[in-house]
Amino acid sequence: MPTYTYKARDAAGKSVKGTMETENKTELIDRLHKMGYMTTSASEVASGRQFGLLFDKLKWIAASDMLMFYIQLSNMINAGITILTSLSILANQIENRGLKEAVGSVARQVEGGSLLSRAFRLHPRIFSKLFVSMIEVGEESGKLDTVLSRYADFFEQQEELKQKIKGALFYPLILFLAGAAVSLFIVTFIIPQFAQIYLKAGIKLPLPTLIVFKVGLAIKRYWYLLVIFVIAIILGLRYYFKTEKGGFLFDTLKLRAPIIGSLYRKAVISRFSRTLSTLLGSGVPILKSLDITKEVLGNLVLARVITNVRKSVENGEHIAEPLKISGEFPPDVAQMISVGEETGGLVEMLYKIANFYDLAVSYAVKKLTTVIEPLFLVIMGSMVGLIMASMLMPMFDLVKTLRR
């Protein structure tokens, strides 16, 4: 069924726009008319999703806005309010423009007779495949309220985990930027002025001072070339890491990196366990759950492991064995999953694993903060100290010259 984008006006003359799946343009106009809208323009989307992707990319939506939407929608459905009424209320009170328009479009889709999951699927940049799949299961099982509540809890726990990791890296990043800014200022403005004084006094600059002086002059004169070079390197790396080979290499480095790698692995294992637990607990078939989990992980190395797990499950085998063989998942995870499969409590066991690794991430973040903050202070202090030393070294020769 083709998808159309439209613009229309309601009875009060207020302009609305959105997307809707209909057999043809005439049916679209008829549906909008029955809903109380007068169509002003309508056009078919060539690929069905390209417009939605482009439209959603232009609108930044904070995780806190998404979390509030999921919680409010879950609470309203649990309270017995109809889906259409819930969506309409939320569309009116949401402040974020991108999310407001998306929810309004979903409400109009549902009002026009579309399934809720299909309406959400038209906005893949806003509503994840995991969310849409769970909504689909909720519609089929008649337990939409339970599914929404599960997803709201899942999203909240994932955001808490992200904030912990971001919080651990925020202070060291500020230290690095501040240290880099101070070093750049000294090298490009302070050192050259002192160097000119030394040279006019006929003092030969020591090698460290000469190097810092020349670097400072080069940065000051050719800063635009340096900016172009840095941008070119960043774009080149981004392009390479987007390829299959480059992405696999980058994800491998993230897992193997000292200190950070252990924290990253724990966070991904927590995401794997919680995602799979949430999907299976919501009634999503195991093969589809594994497919969705593989996409949610965001790591090609572990995604390849999940692909092997899916093949094993498809052949009637267990999940735990290929996880153990891969060597990418800790033995305790594979063992606990094995116990869960044997006892029929896989969902509960995955949930326990997720909670345990969330706790492990919290401790790892505290440990990382304890180690990385003094480390950055020492590195930046040493850098600034060396620069200052290179500036002061010729001063001893200048004092000798003045005494003469």
Image: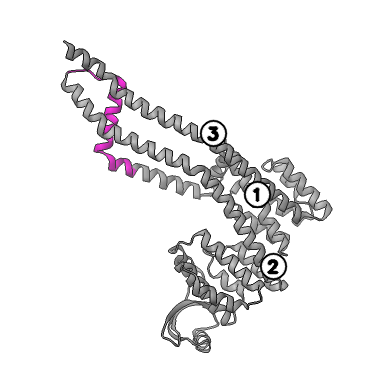
Query: In the image, is residue 207 above or below residue 7?
Result: above
Residue found farthest to the front: 79
Q: Which residue is mark 2?
A: 146
Query: In the image, is residue 12 above or below residue 256?
Result: below
Q: Which residues are magenta?
A: 202-228
Residue found farthest to the top: 404
Q: Image point 33% across, 23% down: which residue?
A: 389
- Quadrant where the C terminus lies? top left
Name the main secondary structure of what is drawn in magenta: helix
Front residue of 149 and 268: 149
Q: CA distance from mark 2 to mark 3?
A: 42 Å
Which numbered marker is on residue 270? Answer: 1
SS at badge 3? helix
Of the numbered discs 3 and 1, the one sitting upstream in the chain is 1
**Location of residue 27 in the rendering, given as x and y in whole percent from the top left corner:** 53, 86
Residue count near mark 2 (Cα–Cα under 10 Å), binned few <14, some 14–19, many ≥20: some
SS at badge 1? helix
**Location of residue 345 in the rendering, given as x and y in whole percent from the top left corner:** 79, 55
Of the numbered discs 1 and 2, the one sitting upstream in the chain is 2
Front residue of 21 and 105: 105
Query: In the image, is residue 129 above or below residue 301?
Result: below
**Location of residue 37 in the rendering, given as x and y in whole percent from the top left corner:** 47, 86
Q: Nearer the viewer, mark 1 or mark 2?
A: 2
Residue count near mark 1 (Cα–Cα under 10 Å), binned few <14, some 14–19, many ≥20: many
Q: Which residue is mark 3?
A: 371
